[in-house]
Image: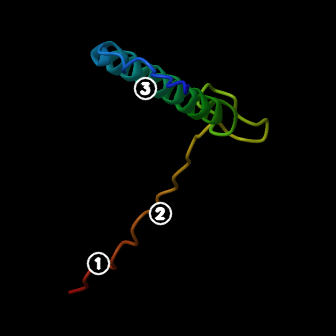
Amino acid sequence: MSQINVNPGGSSNDGARAAAAGISMMVVAIVIATVIVLGVVAYGGFAGHWFGGSTPGNSGGTTNVTVQPQNQAPAASR
């Protein structure tokens, strides 16, 4: 006599599995976005000096502009 094993059919609750997969995908996307945002803020804070951390020799972004006066044309003689 031979034996036949029959596995039960697949779950008919595919909607719940799809919803769980979608939620998991959103959680992963949020975690990746958070890591990217934290990386950008850390880079801007340490390398870009976003938070006022200027170097001691730096003038803090001040720009001096020297304007040369125009030469006066000689007066016309009569």
Q: CA–CA distance between discs 2 and 1?
A: 21 Å
Per the model, the C-alpha gap separating discs 3 and 1 is 81 Å
Badge 1 marks a residue whose secondary structure is loop
Q: Residue at x 45, y 21 (%)?
A: 7
Question: Mark 1 or mark 3, which is nearer the start of the sequence?
Answer: 3
User: Is residue 10 depicted above or below 55 in this figure?
Assistant: above
Q: Looking at the image, is 69 positioned above or below residue 43?
A: below
Q: Amino acid at mark 2?
A: Gln
Of residue 5 and residue 45, the one placed in the foreground of this image is 5
> The N terminus lies in which quarter of the figure?
top right
Category of crowding for the residue at label 2, using alpha-carbon neighbours closer than 10 angstroms: few (below 14), some (14–19), many (at least 20): few
Q: Amino acid at mark 3?
A: Met
Q: Is residue 38 left or right of residue 76?
A: right
Classify residue 74 by image quadrant.
bottom left
The residue indicated by pointer 1 is 75
Q: Residue at x 40, y 22 (%)?
A: 21
Circle 2 is placed at which residue position?
68
Of discs 3 and 1, which sits in the foreground?
3
Q: Are marks 2 and 3 in contact (CB under 8 Å)?
A: no
Q: How many residues crowd mark 3 within 10 Å: few (<14), some (14–19), many (20+)?
A: few
Q: Amino acid at mark 1?
A: Ala
- Judging by the rendered image, the residue that carries numbered circle 3 is 25
Most extreme residue toward the left is: 78
- Residue 57 spot, x, y in % from top left: 78, 41
- Select label 2 or label 1 by which is in front: 2
- Residue 36: x and y in percent read 54, 33
The location of residue 19, given as percent across then percent down, is 33, 16
Cα separation between marks 2 and 3: 63 Å
Which residue occupies 55% across, 46% down? 63
Which quarter of the picture shows residue 40? top right
